[in-house]
Image: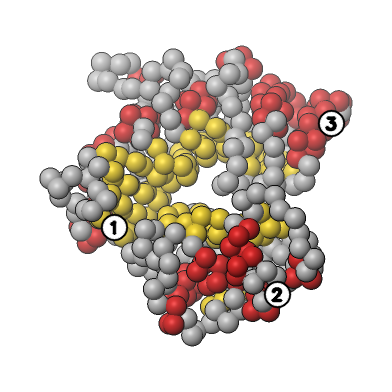
């Protein structure tokens, strides 16, 4: 028997209501205890306040303790922009224990939370799909290392499917993530989405993956990945592999469908590499820059673009074609466009709902909001500096933006402001 809860608005109250409803309903408690095998709780509101965390941390152990037949649990929060994951770090072993759970999909705050979920309290767990907000230095007492002298119990022998998604940059990939993966010796399917920050090192490529991870997983038959490596303080002694070399390092290990692009700026001492399996399987694509080679990314709904050289009209045209179902776009670029005269071709983002321009040059507001350049028929949310908004709208009198702004329901600016008299005429739904 399966049951689902989908929380969308006023989540703190509704989530607590769910907690009270489950705990107070004799029928539902009986179903959870004796019949329910699959439970799905998804939160889809990006405006959730952090005070929800306590409620979420209460619900998770409560469900585990009550559900004696539960084999599949989803406790996820569908957002990439908020600190929304639960924390298992402060929960006792006895409060989060299950002898039946086989599959768990969950969003957590820290890498420690992930380690605690794999410390033996979920004794039958074979599938773990985890989204971690931040991978930082471990504060737990769990030993996440494996040496040749350790007994087999340190290895995660029952785990055959592991998925890890973490969007924020981490400097602890080698120290935290790699040792954990090396413990998964019976893994058959691995999904990895991670952004790694390194110093005076080189890119993570196929050679690194094989030597440090894949050689420990003899049963692995499916590897889906999206790996970003950013090298800071890149000195002249480091030889960075070319893009073809990066792809070949995967292909020679049997991973033939791979996309990648890299960028080395010796002046700034920064090098970047983005490598991903194809066809691309994630809803999120981050830190796209001017070296993006193109491709087809039908599953992507959330895209971030970031570079220290300007984004031109042709790149946005490519993005609109290669990400046909894009709903959320975040642009971080303070460089003025150099080829504004080349913007004669109209670009259309038919599904774009949210556009974030708060950390970008005014040219990108002109690029996206002027209807002669871009059409955004479904735009509902805009993040922008108020001064930029005043300038591009000519103090809310310029008709060139009215079409793209007509359906806006939310504008987030860098501070409070007093709406001028013609503001409502320009944004009729606000």
User: Marks 2 and 1, Cα distance to the nearest angstrom?
Assistant: 43 Å
Across and down, in percent, residue 339 comes to 40, 77
Q: Residue at the bottom extreme?
A: 344
Q: Which of disc 2 and disc 3 is earlier in sequence?
A: 3
Which quadrant would the C terminus be assigned to in this image? bottom right
Q: Residue at x 22, y 45 (%)?
A: 234
CB within 8 Å, label 3 to label 1: no
Residue in view at x 23 percent, y 53 percent: 267
User: Is there CB contact under 8 Å for labels 3 and 2?
Assistant: no
Point out the image quarter for the N terminus: top right
Position above or below: 16 against 310: above
Residue 21's mark?
A: 3
Using the image as rendered, state which of residue 307 and residue 362 is in the foreground.
362
**Secondary element at image label 2:** loop
Q: Measured along the vertical axis of the image, is residue 283 above or below residue 209?
A: below
- Category of crowding for the residue at label 3, using alpha-carbon neighbours closer than 10 angstroms: few (below 14), some (14–19), many (at least 20): some
- Mark 2 or mark 1: which comes first in sequence? 1
Q: Nearer the viewer, residue 177 or 338?
A: 338
| Residue 32 appears left or right of 247 | right
Query: Marks 3 and 2: which is nearer the front?
Result: 2
Which residue is at a point 55% across and 21% down the rendered structure image?
89
Q: CA distance from mark 3 to mark 2?
A: 51 Å
Tag 2 residue: 397
Q: Is residue 327 left or right of residue 410?
A: left
Query: Residue 262, labelled with which disc?
Result: 1
């Amino acid at each position: 028997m399966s049951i689902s809860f989908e929380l969308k608005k006023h989540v703190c109250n509704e989530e607590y209501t769910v907690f009270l409803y489950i705990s107070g309903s004799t029928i539902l408690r009986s179903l959870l205890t004796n019949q329910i095998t699959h439970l799905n709780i998804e939160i889809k509101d990006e405006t959730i306040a952090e005070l929800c965390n306590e409620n979420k941390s209460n619900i998770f152990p409560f469900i585990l303790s009550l559900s004696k037949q539960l084999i599949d649990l989803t406790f996820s929060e569908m957002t990439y922009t908020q600190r929304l994951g639960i924390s298992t770090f402060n929960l006792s072993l006895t409060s989060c224990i299950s002898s039946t759970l086989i599959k768990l999909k969950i969003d957590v705050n820290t890498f420690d939370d992930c380690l605690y979920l794999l410390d033996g309290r979920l004794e039958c767990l074979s599938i773990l799909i985890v989204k971690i907000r931040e991978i930082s230095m471990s504060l737990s007492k769990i030993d996440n290392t494996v040496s040749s002298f350790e007994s087999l119990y340190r290895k995660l022998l029952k785990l055959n499917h592991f998925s890890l998604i973490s969007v924020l940059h981490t400097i602890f990939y080698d120290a935290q993530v790699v040792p954990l993966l090396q413990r998964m010796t019976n893994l058959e399917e691995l999904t990895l989405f991670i952004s790694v920050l390194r110093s005076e090192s080189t890119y993570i490529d196929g050679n690194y993956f094989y030597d440090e991870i894949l050689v420990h997983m003899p049963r692995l038959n499916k590897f889906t990945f999206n790996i970003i490596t950013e090298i800071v303080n890149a000195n002249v002694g480091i030889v960075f592999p070319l893009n073809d070399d990066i792809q070949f390092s995967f292909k020679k290990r049997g991973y033939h469908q791979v996309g990648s692009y890299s960028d080395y700026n010796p002046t700034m001492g920064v090098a970047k590499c983005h490598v991903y399996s194809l066809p691309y399987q994630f809803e999120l694509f981050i830190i796209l820059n001017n070296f993006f080679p193109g491709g087809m990314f039908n599953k992507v709904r959330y895209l971030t673009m970031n570079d220290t050289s300007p984004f031109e009209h042709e790149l946005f045209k490519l993005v609109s074609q290669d990400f046909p179902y894009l709903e959320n776009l975040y642009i971080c670029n303070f460089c003025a466009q150099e080829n504004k005269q080349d913007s004669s071709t109209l670009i259309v983002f038919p599904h774009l709902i949210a556009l974030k321009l708060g950390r970008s040059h005014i040219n990108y507001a002109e690029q996206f909001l002027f209807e002669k350049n871009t059409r955004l028929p479904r735009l509902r949310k805009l993040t922008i500096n108020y001064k930029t908004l005043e300038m591009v709208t000519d103090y809310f009198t310029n008709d060139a933006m009215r079409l793209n702004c007509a359906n806006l329901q939310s504008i987030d600016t860098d501070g409070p402001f007093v709406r001028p008299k013609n503001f409502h005429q320009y944004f009729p739904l606000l």
